């Protein structure tokens, strides 16, 4: 974001972070670590509520972690404690920018409860779009239209 702020065509006061899946987790991290982000667009955020995801989904890469922990039960608590350090929930709790989230009810990669957890942990003003019949692709172009409307509402 520092690089974006130095560009002469960028309005430094209106920088938004955006991403889906792993990018959604990174958008959460950026929103939580950079206090003056103007907006966050967080779609089907991967790497949120990691412990729960490992416990409930058999989709990789969470299933890969579950298989590792099954084979090394002596390390399971240590593995999950280490992963907790960069769980998106921690960043969400620090974020203050207005945010638009999405989650999809048929998402095997980012289970819905993990998306809801990220939303509920988010400290700033927020809205959530739920896509009932979608998987990890989330709302696709419909979510993009929601994002454009959201940003217009913030930035005019």
Image (spheres, rainbow, N blue to C red):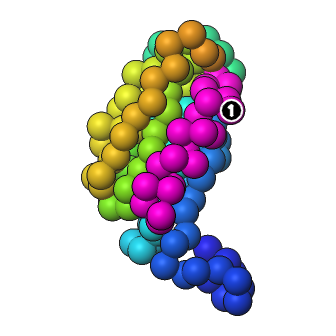
Q: Position of residue 14 (x, y in %)?
A: 51, 72
Is 46 positioned to the left or the right of 99 in the image? Answer: right
Residue 104 in view here: yes
The one of 40 and 73 positioned closer to us in this rendering: 40
| SS type, badge 1 | helix
The one of 22 and 155 positioned closer to us in this rendering: 155
Residue at figure coordinates x 55%, y 81% from the top left:
12
Q: Quadrant of the N terminus?
A: bottom right
The image shows residue 134, relative to residue 85, as above or below, that is above
**Is residue 107 covered in magenta?**
no
- Based on the displayed image, in which of its 4 quarters is residue 98 positioned? bottom left
Magenta residues (range)? 136-156
**Is residue 145 covered in magenta?**
yes
Q: Which residue is mark 1?
A: 141
Q: Position of residue 27 (x, y in %)?
A: 55, 53
Residue at figure coordinates x 45%, y 44% from the top left:
100
Is 35 positioned to the left or the right of 75 in the image? Answer: left
The image shows residue 32, relative to residue 116, as above or below, that is below
The one of 95 and 102 positioned closer to us in this rendering: 102
Is 113 positioned to the left or the right of 140 in the image? Answer: left
Residue at figure coordinates x 42%, y 74% from the top left:
36
Residue 86 in view here: no
- Based on the displayed image, in which of its 4 quarters is residue 51 positioned? top left
Q: Residue furthest front?
A: 156
Q: Position of residue 118 (x, y in %)?
A: 39, 38
Other-residue count near label 1 (Cα within 10 Å), few / some / many at <14 / 14–19 / ≥20 = few
- Based on the displayed image, in which of its 4 quarters is residue 59 positioned? top right
The image shows residue 4, relative to residue 156, as above or below, that is below
Residue at figure coordinates x 36%, y 40% from the top left:
127
Q: Position of residue 76 (x, y in %)?
A: 48, 27
């Amino acid at each position: 974001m520092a690089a974006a702020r130095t560009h002469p065509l960028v309005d430094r006061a209106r920088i938004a972070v955006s991403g889906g899946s792993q990018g959604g987790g990174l958008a959460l991290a950026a929103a939580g670590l950079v206090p003056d982000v103007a907006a966050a667009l967080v779609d089907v955020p991967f790497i949120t509520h990691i412990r729960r995801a490992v416990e409930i989904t058999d989709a990789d890469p969470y299933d890969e972690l579950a298989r590792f922990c099954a084979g090394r039960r002596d390390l399971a608590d240590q593995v999950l404690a280490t992963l907790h350090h960069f769980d998106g929930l921690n960043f969400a709790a620090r974020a203050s920018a207005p945010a638009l989230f999405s989650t999809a009810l048929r998402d095997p990669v980012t289970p819905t409860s993990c998306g809801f957890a990220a939303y509920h942990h988010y400290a700033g003003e927020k809205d959530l779009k739920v896509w009932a019949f979608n998987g990890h692709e989330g709302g696709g172009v419909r979510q993009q239209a929601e994002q454009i409307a959201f940003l217009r509402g913030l930035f005019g």
